[in-house]
Every structure is written in structure tokens, then in C-alpha cells.
Image (cartoon, rainbow, N blue to C red):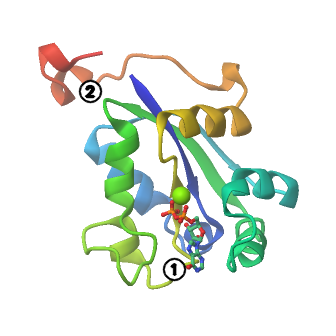
Amino acid sequence: MERTLIILKPDAVQRGLIGPIIARFERKGLQIVALKLTRLDSAVARQHYAMHEGKPFYDGLIQFISSGPVVVMVLQGNHVIETVRKMMGATSGFNAEPGTIRGDFGLSSSFNLIHGSDSPATARAEIARFFAPEELLDFPAASWPWVYAPGERP
Ligand code: IDP
Ligand code: MG
């Protein structure tokens, strides 16, 4: 099964949106296989957002993502990377469709609540950045027989 790395950014934590956001993923049928509250120092933040270095919003982004506690977690499920990206919505809360996390909870293009990996290769690198292998729990979810039809089941 596919895995993806999620960060609930400092605005989500400070606004009390950890529960409502995680609830959406649980209701969808996705499985949490790793989870922690932590804080990104600026070295980790720079590594995580290295692809945006040089862009006008880069310094503000590093400042923002390291400005307070974040929740990092790994979600698992069939097609989880694309599923989560759809659930997140467009980068800016103003543009994001209602029904998405960013569309329902935010208005900003920088304080946009959540990060989700954008490809399998990125997900592998990002998961390894935040979790040691033994922190990833491999267990059959009790919901699987009802979330997935027999042919789709892990
Ligand atoms: P994504 O999070 O939807 O994948 P990216 O383009 O990868 O969006 O940008 C990474 C993060 O950088 C965004 O989530 C947002 O916090 C910030 N960001 C992106 N574009 C802008 C912008 O135009 N102004 C301010 N911040 C931005
Ligand atoms: Mg991105």
C-alpha cells in the first residue's frame, strides 16, 4: 500500500484544527501508521522546502513552518498520495474548492494548514526525513474489510 507524509502546519495546530483535519482522513478510510507533535528547526525546514529555494516566498515559508509546533504523520492507503492532495485542495485557501481542507478552513496562500507529499519518490524521502523505520507501524486496520472490496484489499 502507498504511504504519504503529512504536516499539519503551525496555523492548523494553533487554530485547534488538528482533530478536525485528522478526522477527515480517518473518515475517508485512510490509516495512520506514524504520528507525532514536533517542531521543525530551520535546517530541517530548509531541507524539506529545498525545491522552493530562491522563490520570493521562500524565507517567509521557512520562518512560518518553523514558528511553532507541527503534527507530522504518515498515512497509508491505496492511492493515498493523490487522494490526500485532492482532500487538501489548491495551495491558496482563497482558490481551494469548498469541501477541501484548505477550501473549508483557510483564506491564505502561505498559511495554508497542511503539507502532503506530491509523488511516490517525494513521499519516500519525506517519510525518511521525519521518521525512523521503527516508528512506522505495520498493522492491518480493522476497517480494511469494509473500506476495500476483496479485489482491492491490501
Ligand atoms: P503545495 O503545498 O500545495 O504543494 P507548493 O507550491 O509546493 O504548494 O508550495 C509550498 C508551500 O509554500 C505552500 O504550501 C505555501 O505554504 C507556500 N507558498 C506557495 N506559494 C506561495 C505564494 O505564492 N505565496 C506565499 N506562500 C506560498
Ligand atoms: Mg508542494
User: Which quadrant of the rendered structure holds the N terminus?
Assistant: top left
What's the residue at 52%, 46% (across, down)?
117
Which residue is located at x 57 percent, y 40 percent? 122
Residue 65 quadrant: bottom right
From the viewer's perspective, is residue 9 above or below residue 123?
Answer: below
Task: Name the spot of residue 21 as percent of width and height, x first.
Answer: 42, 59
Callout 1: SS: loop
Closer to the camera in the image, 132 or 51? 51
* Residue 7 image point, x, y percent: 58, 53
Which label belongs to residue 109? Answer: 1
Q: Nearer the viewer, residue 53 or 34?
A: 53
Q: Would you say the beta carbon of the disc 1 residue lies within 8 angstroms of ligand 1? A: yes
Residue 103 placed where, x, y %?
Answer: 34, 75
Give the quarter the ligand 1 occupies.
bottom right
With 85 as the anchor, is 124 left or right in this view?
right
Q: Does the closest atom of ligand 1 sit within 8 Å of the Cβ of label 2?
A: no
Element assignment for label 2? loop
Q: Earlier in the sequence, mark 1 or mark 2?
A: 1
Residue 137 placement, left or right of 61 = left
Q: Report how far apart the C-alphas of labels 1 and 2 lie in the structure.
A: 35 Å
Residue type pointed to by label 2:
Ser
In the picture, the quarter occupied by the C terminus is top left
Q: Which residue is mark 2?
A: 143
> Could you tell whether 154 is left or right of 149 in the image?
right
| Residue nearest the observer in this picture, 124 or 146 | 124
Residue type, label 1: Ser
Give the image location of residue 2, x and y in percent: 41, 28
What residue is rendered at 80% in x and 51% in y?
Answer: 44
